[in-house]
Amino acid sequence: MKVELRNIHKSFGPVHANNGITLDVPAGTIQGILGENGAGKSTLMKILSGFIREDAGEIVLDGKTVRINTPSDAIKYGIGMLHQDPLDFLPMRVLDNFIIGAEGGVFPNKAQARKEFTDLQAQFHFNIDPDAYVDSLTVGERQQLEILRLLWLGARVLILDEPTTGISSSQREKLFATLQILSEQGKTLFFVSHKLEEVEGLCHRIAVFRQGEVVGEVSPPYNTDDLVRLMFGKEVKLNEREEIARDGTGIQFQNITIEDSRMRISNIDLDIRPGEVIGLAGMAGSGQRQFLKACCGLLKPVAGKVHLHEKDLTGKPYHEFLANGVAYVPASRLEEGLIEGLTLNEHFILAEKQEGFIINRDKYKSITQERIREFNIKGRPGSPVEALSGGNQQRALLALMKTPLDFLLVEHPTRGLDVESSIYIWGKLKERCRQGTSIVFISADLEEILHYSDRVLVFFGGKVSRPLDARSTSVDQLGQLIGGKGFEA
């Protein structure tokens, strides 16, 4: 399907998110969309998929002007969008989520849907249990489920917003191979990503957004430096590697065993020094998220001890860890980290310790304005958190963390962020390290893990490697371990 976007405008108050955007995308094209956080990429994709309405402009599909008022309209026109935060129902089973939105009356044919689900995911080489509850899936698995659902509903134009976040390298390769096949079948794909190497390797053409406008359209062969300059209007360089860890032990895990419905992880021994950064690598669902939750009381270990500065916190709930200087930043920003519908100001009111029964709103507005400046959040105290871009939501989450902290746990700290935002986030995390905060984080980006970690733990099928020195470990070595080759339990 050929897609034409003509002179699209969209404003949110004083912010002109899309300012006269025009794109002409032929059928069968994998169209890359690049730009810094807040550049207007997601706004345009939400307009195309019916989640918001444009203020002005036209959408033309195969030469016919259409009006897309809702996501249901978009699906009827053959347009589906995979959002950065998957749209699903956590308390429901995978198969029930899969058939949502399909025609078929009150009693859908689940046996037929199950067969079609199985056949479809076999094409992608996904391995999702149709009877599992969605809240037991990783972020990557939930994204996979949404891709399958949109294709099953008949999408001929597929919009993918950071689709590789939270999935393994092998899953990414299978996904890319499938996207190539869909392109050859004449389907049109919009691939929104901050990962330059992915866009360069996959896309037939790239449109670069900055401050709500298309500032360049590029065809292969691509030049990474040129793309970065188009995105930011300047050169952006990675921070130098920095060693901050101090002597001593901040938090200690002694012979920890973790068990849930998915797997058992046994005999983890780890001493983490103040200011040290530990990276957790592994395919999605290999146990690293369970370990992170056990580090802060969200999942109780079935054996072993957890000590923070010699204080025994074994089996204590999260609020007890929080009171002792431990905080957790989840990957699902709007589902677990922030509260949709509340403003930035209201979040800082909830995060601060209350004095008395009356809330001093002027005081908290001042605090919010200070944090907005300190963390360079593109928003105002009255901005609802769901109106912020992914990068600004991540900055808001970090701004909500109290100071000082002894131990900070972060899932995918730069998930969905552009290069400059990723560098900024890690600058803030390293500031914490200089204050003595130990950090443990999960990332699907192996280069990020090796660049920012002091030591790395690799998870494979519930097993955990010995701690690896990040300075003497290569991406290839990590990749082999993640695949189970040469793995030492």
Image: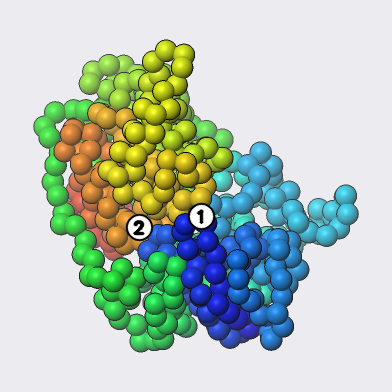
Please identify the residue farthest to the top as the structure is shown. 356
Mark 2: which amino acid?
Asp
Residue, x 64% and y 76% (percent of image)?
59
Query: How many numbered discs, if any?
Result: 2
Q: Nearer the viewer, residue 162 or 249?
A: 162
Task: Decide: is 411 above or below 122.
Answer: above
Residue, x 69% and y 42% (percent of image)?
92
In x, y percent, where is residue 313? Answer: 35, 19
Classify residue 424 as left or right of residue 385.
left
Q: Nearer the viewer, residue 252 or 486?
A: 252
Residue for badge 1: 13
Badge 1 element: loop
Residue for badge 2: 445
**Distance between mark 2 and mark 1 Cα atoms:** 36 Å
In x, y percent, where is residue 316? Answer: 41, 18
Image quarter hosting the N terminus: bottom right
Task: Decide: is 387 above or below 179.
Answer: above
CB atoms at circles 2 and 1 under 8 Å apart? no
In x, y percent, where is residue 104? Answer: 86, 58
Q: Nearer the viewer, residue 36 or 485?
A: 36
Mark 1: which amino acid?
Gly
Badge 2 element: loop
Observer-side mark, 2 or 1, equals 1
